[in-house]
Amino acid sequence: MKRSRTSEMWSYFEILDREFAKCTLCGKKLSYKSTTTNLKKHLQKSHLIVNFSSQRPSELDLGETLPVEVILGTSSVEEERAAPAPSMQQGVQSSVTLYLSKRIGVNQKRKIDGQLLQLFTKNFQPFSVVEDSGFRGFVRALNPGYELSSRKHISDVMLQAAYTAAKEKVVDKLSAAQTVCLTTDCWTSAANEGYMAVTGHFVSEDFTLQSVLLGCSQLSGAHTAPNLSATLIGTTDNFRLTDKVLLVVTDNAPNIKNAVPILRWKHFGCYAHTLNLIVQNALKHFVSIQQKVKTIVAFFKRSCKATERLLTYQENNGAGHVITGAGVDFEQLTDEEWNICSELCSLLKPFAQLSTQLSAESYPTGSQVIVLTRGLLSVCAELLKMPFNSVTKTIIEELTKGLKDRFHNVEMSKSIGVATLLDPRFKSLVFES
């Protein structure tokens, strides 16, 4: 026999006395006196249970009067109470599923799909997360009316649609740019796959520097200059930028340096990359000490026990000490070598600061190249006057030589020269000539 709406509603409550009942889902004590209005409102508001039996929510009578048996507490009510009440999960899930599944419209699903997609486009989660039982249960608990898409649908349909929409916005944004500068880099992944990334930079109508990632694609075949140039032209054609490219900034690898002139674009070597090459070349005079430092670091990274001993030892004896004794299989740094390491930290700090300064994305940096290069040369000249270790002085001399060799003609660059001249901070003040 089908249970009445009232009797089904009472399966969610335990009668305490003639005035109060306790919700079996949350344990809250509620007053009911002679009607079920308060109890039904509680189920609607706190547990979203608004659909008893097969009746629609609109058919519920919130002011329905309690039957005489309930008021008097007769045996028929006791029988109802004796029936096992549904668990919270069963009661809430069955009712909420029926209710909310009818409330999910096309626009609402599209909105939730958009938020789901951000797990992959912004947080780089794997597509397989939608197949995880824990994640599916979490989504179902939040909104049982929403049906998760499959990983194939997300990757093949939703992601492609999002890319198309984003690309249209980027193309429209770039259409207002008169000229565009490109930066590009190539690398090999841990899976031994080659990739190339291309980013476009331009100044908007309100003179704000804008940067847009144009592509990050896998490279097939040998990384020769013709193949790299074909990838570059394919990317710019895809965004209708080929005729707007002013110059291209790359690292100093021969293949990419030779690829850019094939397209008749102006090429600039990355300043930060060139500066890194200067430093690496100078540190060749530090290689023996550097190897000892690497061995010590590797030893403590391999052993949690040794790291714990080291931290305890340094807390008692001060930083800069390394433990010795049984189980330690590395050669200690001498006091002189410790001093050289300390001197190099001070020496290389300006190079690190300059590299960061010229790698900024929110403002143009071309006008700073001349002044900062001359500043580094001045710093090196002053450091040579200081009473450093002979190894440190040799490194300073190599750094000075590298700066002069690689940047000797920086003032002859028309692009860098004009950018510096137009910068109101510098104008013609920083030119030697």
Image (cartoon, rainbow, N blue to C red):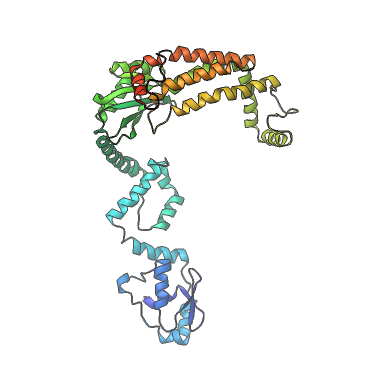
Q: Is residue 400 above or below residue 118?
A: above
Image quadrant occupied by the N terminus: bottom left
Q: Is residue 91 above or below residue 315?
A: below
Along the line of sight, the residue nearer the viewer: 298 or 130:
298
Residue 105 occupies quadrant: bottom left
Q: Is residue 44 above or below residue 404?
A: below
Query: Residue 89's spot in the image, x, y percent?
Result: 46, 63
Along the line of sight, the residue nearer the viewer: 52 or 184:
184
Count of numbered labels shown in the rendering: 0
Q: Is residue 278 above or below residue 169?
A: above
Query: Residue 263's spot in the image, x, y percent?
Result: 28, 18
**Residue at screen point 33% across, 26% down:** 182
Along the line of sight, the residue nearer the viewer: 185 or 352:
352
Please indicate whether residue 291 sits to the left or right of residue 136 in the image: right
Residue 227 in sight: no
Residue at the limit of the structure toward the right, as seen here: 325
Residue 15 in sight: yes
Query: Residue 326's spot in the image, x, y percent?
Result: 75, 28
**Residue at screen point 43% across, 67% down:** 46
Residue 264 occupies quadrant: top left
**Residue at screen point 30% across, 42% down:** 162
Image quadrant occupied by the C terminus: top left
Query: Residue 329's spot in the image, x, y percent?
Result: 70, 24
